[in-house]
Image: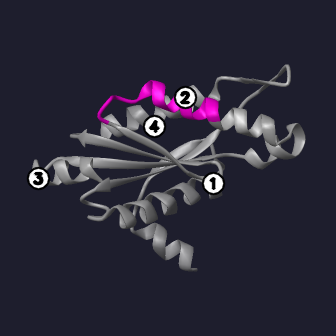
Amino acid sequence: MMAMAENRRNQKKTALIMVDLDHFKDINDNLGHDAGDEVLKEVGARLESILRQTDTICRIGGDEFALLISDVSLKETVKIVAKRIIDVLNKPFTLNGLKEVMTASLGIAIYPEDGKSLRTLMKHADTAMYEVKKRGRNNYLYYQPSMNIKSLA
């Protein structure tokens, strides 16, 4: 929230990236909740390792994380971050002696174009993330207003 207020004051953009782990339920079901908890900790550490100190990461529930990328001047910057997220999560996790690959679906909303409140940005990033899941997962999409129309059909 502070990053958004500062960016608003300085007329800079902020990106909100919603990250949802694909097929995370399979980890819990097949390897147990302890293994799932380890994956979540490792995902958090991996995401944190690719962010700047000015960026914010939080787990918002289950297997979803939100990343607030401050001071975004170009969509290309956000694209680079999204690709890094996918790459860092595609590296195998070692669970119970087995190597497991985790993928993620990412939805991106940009302040102020896609919303001026955190609530609206989260809604729009979430809409884009579910569109990624519908299209096959392990990718990212920027929010587009037409996604709302499709989801109502």
What residue did someone put label 3 on?
Answer: 9
What residue did someone put label 4 on?
Answer: 82
Q: Which mark is residue 133?
A: 1
> Which tag is nearer the camera, tag 3 or tag 1?
3
Residue lying at 54% horizontally and 27% vertically, measured from the top left: 46
Determine if residue 102 is in view: no
Q: Main secondary structure of the magenta part?
A: helix
**What's the distance in space between the residues labelled 2 and 3, CA to CA?**
31 Å
Residue lying at 39% horizontally and 66% vertically, measured from the top left: 119
Element marked by disc 2: helix
Q: Position of residue 3 (x, y in %)?
A: 25, 47
Q: Residues within 10 Å of mark 3 (few under 14, many from 20)?
A: few
Q: Which residues are magenta?
A: 41-54
What residue did someone put label 2 on?
Answer: 45
**What's the distance in space between the residues labelled 1 and 2, CA to CA?**
23 Å
Q: Position of residue 61 (x, y in %)?
A: 60, 54
